[in-house]
Image (spheres, rainbow, N blue to C red):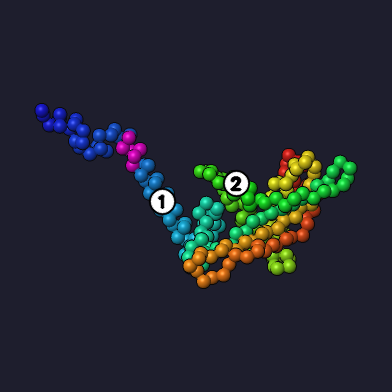
Amino acid sequence: MGPDDERDEPGGGAGLTRLSLPARVAVAAGAAVVTVAAAVHMGMVFLHVAPSNTVSKQHAQAIGDYIYPEFEQNWKFFAPNPLQQNVAVQARAELKGPDGRTTLTRWTDLSAQDGAAIHHNLLPSHTQQNQLRRAWDFYAGTHDARERPNGLRGSLSEEYIRRIAVARLSGQEGRPVQRVQVRAVTTVVAPPPWSDEKGGGDPSYRTLAWWPVATADLPEANR
């Protein structure tokens, strides 16, 4: 058995050296792409969570477009002060019948719909996970305790969550939606038995006023 025979045995020689030149170029290019992608990802996340600085201010739009919604950092999930509330967004509609009379639907738990769609789903969509939650956070952050907008984005947040509610409630009983009403039901998560914190109790409700539905609010199929 000569030297050439030894190189043909399994395990003899380096794996890459046995590849053809095009294959080695492809492997090197793939490794370079993975390295660059990892470096970009780590850099974007670092600039997002780091204190405000010249680079993050100059490229704030690009950083935000990359981070949201897939890589959003929500520190409420972590100790020492994790989120201790469950917030369910619900909606109901006023429907107009053929005779001109209106009827009210029951409250529909929109958050429960998203939860059911995500449950046992290995690849839930970002719409199911984030759209409703972010819409309510957007509204709550742009309105005061009397539901008055505290900035120019207040009207936009109302339009956003109203259209989500209309899209979810349209088509019920085959009658058009005249108005919608949204509310948030907040339930405090009971603390563990070993904790001295107080929690639980009855849920609290934040009920918004009725919103009339315009043609622009309707899904395209119902316009």
Quarter-wise, where is residue 3 in the image?
top left
**For the point 25% across and 37% down, which residue is it?**
15
Amino acid type at image mark 1: Ala
- Which percent across, then down, holds residue 210? 78, 57
**For the point 54% across and 70% down, which residue is it?**
197
Amino acid type at image mark 2: Ala
Residue at which label 2 appears = 116
Which residue occupies the extreme right position in the image?
A: 99
Nearer to me, 158 or 93 = 93
Nearer to me, 136 or 150 = 136
Label located before the other in sequence (1 or 2): 1
Quarter holding the C terminus? top right
- Disc 1 and disc 2: Cα gap in Å? 34 Å
- Which percent across, then down, holds residue 101? 87, 47
Quarter-wise, where is residue 8 in the image?
top left
The magenta region covers 23-28
Circle 2 SS class: helix
Residue at which label 1 appears = 38
Quarter holding the N terminus? top left
**Left or right placement of residue 215 versus residue 49 in this view:** right
**Does residue 57 appear anywhere in the picture?**
no
Q: Is residue 217 magenta?
A: no
